[in-house]
Image (cartoon, coloured by chain):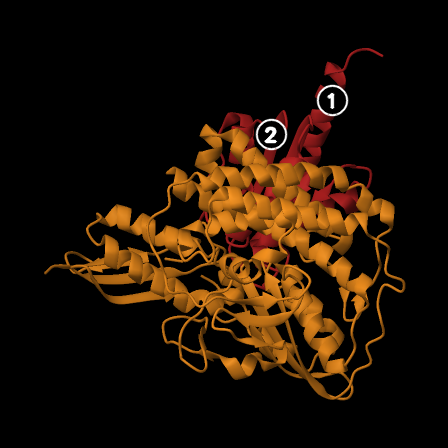
Amino acid sequence: MIALGNPARGDDGFGPAVLDALRKTSPTAGDLHRAGDDALALLDLWADRPWVIAIDAADTGATPGTHRRLDVADGFLPAGPARVSSHGFGLAEAVELGRRLGRLPRRLIVHSAAGACFAAGAGLSPAVAAAVPSTAEAVRRDIAALETTAAAAAPDA
Amino acid sequence: MATRTIKVDYLTRVEGEGALYVKIDGDRVEDLQLRIFEPPRYFEGLLRGRDFREAPDITARICGICPVAYQTSAVNALEAAAGVAPTPAIRALRRLMYCGEWIQSHALHVYMLHAPDFLGYPSGMALAKDAPDIVERGLALKKAGNALMAAVGGRAVHPINWCVGGFYRAPERHELDGLTDQLKRARDIAAQTVRWVSGFDFPELEQPYIFVALRDDARYPMEGGRIAASTGLDIPVADYPAHFVEHQVPYTTAKHAYLTETGQPYLVGPLARLALNVRKLTPGARHALAVSGLDLPCRNPYRSIIARAVEILFACEEALRLIADYAPPNPPAVPVPPRAATGHGASEAPRGLLYHRYRMDAEGIIQDADIVPPTSQNQAMIEADVRAFIAHNADLDDASLQWRCEQTIRNYDPCISCATHFLNLRLDRGTGTP
């Protein structure tokens, strides 16, 4: 599970907040990462993984706090202004670059919440903060389902 | 004769946000403004009242691409103020980490931001679709640079291991030995990169540049040196304020810079470094440069991509040499007691000369600070390049002219976050809505 975003930039801290919630409530959840500011590093971070769940804030204009789950196999992430990433490179660009280079995990699921404010030092807006626990729960369900599927697909010992 | 306006609201493939506005009358540029429109970031203001030991970590946050440059110029200035010189071993480790920054920053620019201009692609992403092997080369180079920065600095972005006087912790030999194979592969890719970019088609343009870069008697400039210029200027860094002046212009939040004596703009960055220091290159880089056909001094800004590629190769070779010779500095830092003084420091950021000045009191509290990033220094020269290109190519249609204007700006790998932030182009030929 990879959390993206910068807690110093308002609702961009959504991903790290979900990560913190998962660590508190599911300390054995395992392979949890905070991605830094370099979205290109995602290509290495998720290389050769059977499945990855990414969590990020979105700047879609939807009602703040709106949660969205997207299986990357089903469609494209809407690319938008990656306002805090160097050279405008964010998750959507990393996914598309990974797709073109054949460097995506076999399964990639993205959980996002629409942000309201990405100003420096603003903290999470109330609607986005309210979406954190339910998103963490949705991620937990995904992890459980993916682990079950992986176990079923594994050859008998 | 008809006038026209070219407007680019958001220039892409540069770091930060800015715009370009151009008004053209026939083949005459009536007005041209490179607008860096993000608000000032007040770093110089927020450094006041802080302990001098905080400056490297605070100024590193100015830029996620070149934090080592900010850390280096800051420690150079503060150690000069304190009258302390780091040991050769500490300086060598700083140089090693700086190599990592050059490799990752230059690789990102050459492959993902600048090469698409020459190959007719709108982005590195589009290039990856048709030529994934090429983009993979760039990513491998960038990864090698990041690995070097992380090994010495603790992490690749905003490293945390620098302090005034040296390092908090010196890596063990075996930690660096593990990078050797990766850097050798990067060196080979870098040599391939020089050959690749040398074959691009370069627009014709010759500019009367005044080159400004650091110069070191023994080495290609990176983590320190004296300031030299193609005018014959050769001064200690402390004399920078006497020879260079910053000037505020109304349409941009970044200042322009000029030579004090003549009021002329000047060029910093890879072409300037090569023009003033070519004999200090490592053997492989010198050979690659010779084969590339880049004649020095080079006054065609589009060929800066070759200079950048040569510097990637140089940084790989230099890093391998420094690792082979490495012995951990012991202690990793020298004591730096504060004193009431002013210090000046400079280093060669990937984009060019980065100057810092600090005045601290006897307790080491910073009283004032001055930071002059390379993109600010290049800003007036960028405008001059765009103006010159349009003057010779005004017959191009708007779309082609806009493309070339943006490419001309990208020649500089401008870092607007540093300068303060950057790009959007408006081309006004007076024939339509601006």
Q: Is residue B289 above or below residue B368?
A: above
Q: Residue at x 62, y 76 (%)?
A: B237
Chain A pictured colour? red
Which residue does the numbered mark 1 point to in the structure image? A148
Whether residue B158 is visible to the viewer of this picture, yes or no, is yes
Quarter-of-image position of residue B92 = bottom right
**For residue B6, which quarter of the picture?**
bottom left
Residue at x-position 75% and y-position 55%:
B153
- Residue under label 2, please give it: A104
Q: Write the residue at 36% across / 61% down.
A: B207
The image shows a total of numbered marks equal to 2
Q: Nearer the viewer, residue B361 or B413?
A: B413
10 Å neighbourhood of mark 1: few (<14), some, or many (≥20)?
few
Q: What letter labels the chain drawn in orange?
A: B
B348, above or below A94, in the image: below
Nearer the observer, disc 1 or disc 2? 2
Residue in the foreground of this view, choosing between A155 and A114 = A155
- Secondary structure of residue under mark 2: loop
Q: Chain of mark 2?
A: A
Kind of residue at disc 1 = Thr
Tell me which numbered mark, 1 or 2, is placed earlier along the sequence.
Answer: 2
Q: Position of residue B293 (x, y in %)?
A: 46, 45
Going by the image, does B404 lie left or right of A30?
left
In the rendered image, residue A106, in percent from the top left (x then y), is placed at 63, 24
Instruction: Examine the rendering and report whether any part of residue A89 can be seen.
Output: no
